[in-house]
Amino acid sequence: MKSFAPLACILALASVTPAFAHAFLKHATPGVGSVVAAPPASLLLAYTENLEVPFCTVTVTGPAGAQVQTARPRPVPGEPAEIAVPVHITAPGTYKVSWHALSVDTHKTQGTFSFTVSQ
Amino acid sequence: MDSLAWMLLRGAFRGASVAGAFCGFGTMFLAATLLRRHDLRGLRAIAWVSLSLALGAGLGWFLLQTADFASAQSLSDVIGAIPIVAQDTRFGNLLLARSAALILATMLFQAKLVRPAMLIAAGAVIAESWLGHGGAMADVTGHILLAVSIAHLFAGAAWLGALPALRLAIKTLPEPDARRLGQDFSPLGIACVVTLLATATIQYILLIGRPAALFTTAYGLTASAKILLLIGLITLAARNRQVLVPGLPAARSALLRSIDVEIMVGLAVLIAAGVILQFEPPGMVMVQ
C-alpha cells in the first residue's frame, strides 16, 4: 500500500480546483450585472478569502451620482469571507458598486460591478 | 505603500521577524534534543538575541503593514490605525500573540525549562501559517496549503534556526562531543531538507503551477532566488556532513566558517520568503 501513497498524493493535488490568491469577489447579492425588481436594503459581498472587515470599503453610486451606502461594511456572523453593506435606494436605475477588500493574508484587492433596480 | 520598494521593505521585515522566531525555536529545539546533556550558557544569549530580532523586525513589519492597511498618507494615519490593526485584525492579533509567546518561551528557556519553552516557541513559529494564503482560504486548497506551510515552517526552523546554536556548540564543546553533535545533526538536517523540498514542491504546484512563471513573474523570480539559495544551503550542509565533520578537530575552523555562511544564506532565504508573500502567486486564478 505504501507504494500507492505518492500516487494518491499526486492525484489529490491534481484534483484540487483552481484557487484564488487574495480576496476576490466570489458572488454578490444583488448579483453582478443583475436586474432586481425591488431595491435591496443591503448588499452582500462574498469573497474567496476571509476578510479583515475594518479595512474593507464599499461605495455604491446611484444613477444620479450620489452614494447610497449608509454605513461601513459589516461582518456577517459565521461567514468570515462575507460583508454586508446597508444601502438606502429610492430610485430605479443602475447602481455601481466599487469595493476594496483586505484579506487576512494581508493582501488588498479591489473591483467594481453594477446592478440595476427596475422599479 | 503599494510600490515595489515598500513591498520589499515589508517583506524584509517579515522575513527578519520570522528569522528571529526560527532562531529562538531552533536554539531551544537543539537544547532539548542533541544538546540536552550539555549546559551551554551561550545558548540563552542566542535565545535573547533571537527574541530581540523577532520583536524588533516584528515591530517594523507591524508598522509598515498597518500603514498599508490604512493606505496611510501621514504618520498620524498610521498611529490612528494601530489600535484597529492590533485589536480587530488577524494580522495584529497573531503578531502580538506570537511576540508574547516568544517572550514567554525565552523567559522559560532562561529558567532552564527547556521543553515547555521549545513547545511555546514552536507555536510561535507555525503561527505564521495563518497569515498566508492557506490560512485565508476555507476550501480544500486552503487546508492543504495551511498544513504544508506548517510543516515547511517547522522543518525550516528546526534546521536553519538551530544553526547559531550548533555553531556555538561546535566551537565550545570538546572534540568528541563536537564530532558526535555534528554527526547527530546530520540526519536531523536531512529530514528537514526532505520535508522542505516536499512541501516546497506542493507549494510550487498550487501557487506557481507552470515553469515559465518562475522566470516571468515577481513571485516566480523570488521563488527562483529562494530555490537557488536553498540549493546553496544543501550543498554547504552536504560538505559539512561528508568532509568537515569527519575532519574534526582539524577542520573545526573550516566547519565554523561554513556554518557562518549557512546562517547568512539561511537569513537570505527567510528574507526572500518574506518578500515572496508580498506578491500574487501566478498559479492562482483571478476572477475579477
Image (spheres, coloured by chain):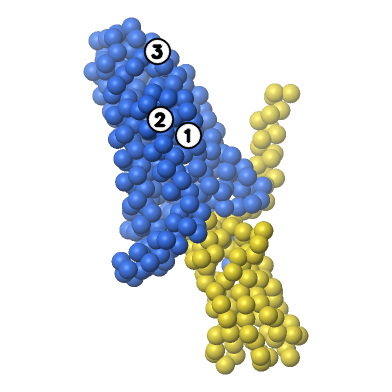
Marks 2 and 3 on same chain: yes
Q: Is residue B7 above or below residue A56?
A: above
Disc assigned to residue B44 = none
Q: Secondary structure at mark 3?
A: loop
**Structural distance between the alpha carbons of marks 2 and 3:** 18 Å
User: Foreground residue, B119 or B228?
Assistant: B119
The picture quadrant where one finds residue A84 is: bottom right
Q: Is residue B282 left or right of residue B75?
A: right
**Label 1: few (<14), some (14–19) or many (≥20) C-alpha neighbours in 10 Å:** many
Q: Which residue is mark 2?
A: B108
Q: First in sequence: mark 2 or mark 3?
A: 3
Q: Is residue A60 visible?
A: no
Mark 1 near mark 3, Cβ–Cβ under 8 Å?
Answer: no
Query: Chain B drawn in what color?
Result: blue
Q: Which residue is mark 3?
A: B37
Q: Is residue B105 visible?
A: yes
Q: Which residue is mark 1?
A: B120
Mark 2 near mark 1, Cβ–Cβ under 8 Å?
Answer: yes
Query: Chain A drawn in what color?
Result: yellow
